[in-house]
Image (cartoon, helix red, strand yellow):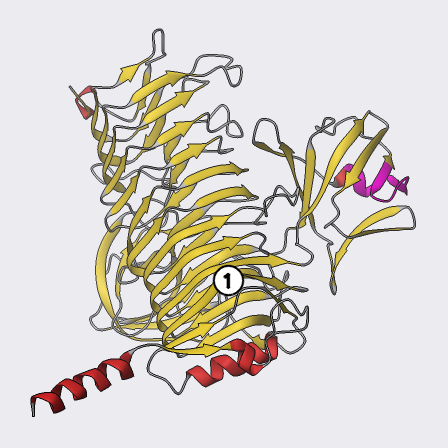
Amino acid sequence: MKYYFSLLILVCTLSLQAQPIDVTRYGALPDSFSDATEGVKKAIEASKGQDQTVLNFPKGRYDFWPDKATETAYYISNSSSETEFPIKKQRVGLYLKGLKNVTIEGNGSEFVFHGKMITWVLDDCSQISIQNLSINYERPGMSEMTLKEVSAQHVVADIHRDSKFAIIDGRLEWYGEKWIARNHHAVLVRPEKGMLLYSSWDPFLKSKAEQTGPLRVKFSGDFSKFNGKPAEVLTIRDRYRDYVGAFINRSKNIRLSNLHMKSMHGLGIVSQFSENLNYDGIFVEPEKGSGRLIASSADGMHFSGCKGQITISNCRFNGLHDDPVNVHGTHLKITEIVSPTTVKLRFMHHQTYGFEAFIAGDSVAYLHTASLQIFEEGVIKTAKLISEREMLVEMKKPFSAALKVGDALENVTWTPSLNIKNCRFEKTISRGTLISTRRKVVIENNVYYRTGMHAILIENDASGWYESGPVMDLDIRNNQFIECGFNSAPDNYIISINPQNKEVVPGYYVHKNINIENNTFKVYDSPLLTARSTKGLIFSNNKIEKSDFLSAGKTKPAFNFTGCTQVKIIGNHFYDGAPRQTKTSAMKSSDILP
């Protein structure tokens, strides 16, 4: 009898272990340069019959073309408008829908995508791991060229070998596999300094292009206002975000590990209304030895309306045209009060719409858009999309008379806790980290190196991007902030707490309980911290070191506070002669604690 039960336990244990599915059995062959898409689709389909699966890719290169890829239709936050991309159809290399307990094991393989594709989609999935692989594109969406000669009348540049181009009627056109760039956005890179600066493709559009070598082009025209210099690299993309790098939708318990995202179209890894996400060892940076400088044409990781715990650890972000990490929800504006319990809502930002921002059972906060004052909360009884832009939401209980047309709703249920640790942020045109969530946030042991704008930005607005919501409990500790903010001068504060409350309500504060301690700030200029409408802000035991990276110019306040209270600056160590001026407005002297 004892033997029987031991055998039964062994059989049950083995049945629960992940069963490997080798993609080569289904026709996906490494290093064959053939299309692996259909074979991988068959392997994914085979996994549906198992309780646990390892989708195994023997090490090698796997190519994915859009021709036989799954076609999807997703509305993705912060991606594209109706004008920019009216029909939301995207081809996907690896499409996982409604799956559980699947591990995609790359074994160090490289997945190379052709044309415009989303690399993977996880939709309505749980307990999914993707690990040990690299993502690249045969023709990245970013075009790059190194400036060789620059004058007021001409520019000579060497085009990167991966940046396909043609000269048609004297004009240079950037093209790829079944696409051409039409809506140009340009960023200038100074490689020796690791700086990304805003620039323009306009003078090149108006110039005459002439190919003078295999990859060399001479542009003749008016370049008197062009800000590039020899040895700098101009990077150019189409500004329309018709695709994203990867998409995780309505999924939970997702783990990404040891992934090298060498190039991505549009937004990077987008996680939308997903829960419990652990991203460890994600490297958003160009392939080493490729000579390319840009890995993502927009954000590195974008989280919209997620919940549970998000952990981002041991990651590196290097070469981005936008923010490495952005975490937020979405405010929808009330356009009509239909009944005492029902309102009509509208998505307001042109790039964010069309998804179910609320579902039955979600808790919501009502707020006045101008002040961002939350004045009431409720629970949703029913919610439905009635058009791409509008939702009809019925509450379980009537709302009060304080609610007016023009107010907004935030989804409180879908707000995550966040931990960002042991990461490095560098070579980005904009910020390092954007945070808008009310639950516990810890940002620790990271390096922010020469981010173009604020290293950390905390906003919350219901009038521009409509990205919610308030920050209630944030620790920023043991980080290094090195020479950040050069694209933001004179507002080049390293940490910016900047809610977009255009009206101030006496005694109401948008953000609360922000603790900035034990960090090192290596600064070339005086601004350190700016904050607005924040209660309980501590800047303590930080070390401020001097850098000669750039000329500082006119001395500005180190601290700038507007409408804040319970602010404490204590125990910090400044270099000799460091500016320590604190500027305040709409505050009493007692709002700064001793």
Location of residue 213 (image quadrant): top right
What stretch of residues is rendered in magenta? 203-218
Percent x, y of residue 181: 73, 54
Nearer-the-camera pick, 386 or 269: 269
82 up-or-down from 482: above or below = below
Give the residue furthest to the left: 1
* Residue at image coords 27%, 46%: 441
Residue 204 left/right relative to 298: right
Q: Is residue 208 magenta?
A: yes
Q: Quadrant of the N terminus?
A: bottom left
Crowd around label 1: few <14 · some 14–19 · many ≥20 (10 Å): many
Percent x, y of residue 466: 42, 52
423 up-or-down from 62: above or below = above
Q: From this viewpoint, is residue 348 visible?
A: no
332 up-or-down from 528: above or below = below
Percent x, y of residue 494: 40, 29
Residue 290 left/right relative to 104: right
Percent x, y of residue 236: 69, 45
* Residue at image coords 59%, 76%: 28
User: To which residue does mark 1 refer?
Assistant: 246
Q: From this viewpoint, is residue 82 visible?
A: yes
Nearer-the-camera pick, 38 or 1: 1
* Residue at image coords 84%, 40%: 216
Give the residue furthest to the top: 577
**Residue kind at label 1, given as amino acid type:** Ala
Q: Is residue 368 magenta?
A: no
* Residue at image coords 43%, 82%: 47
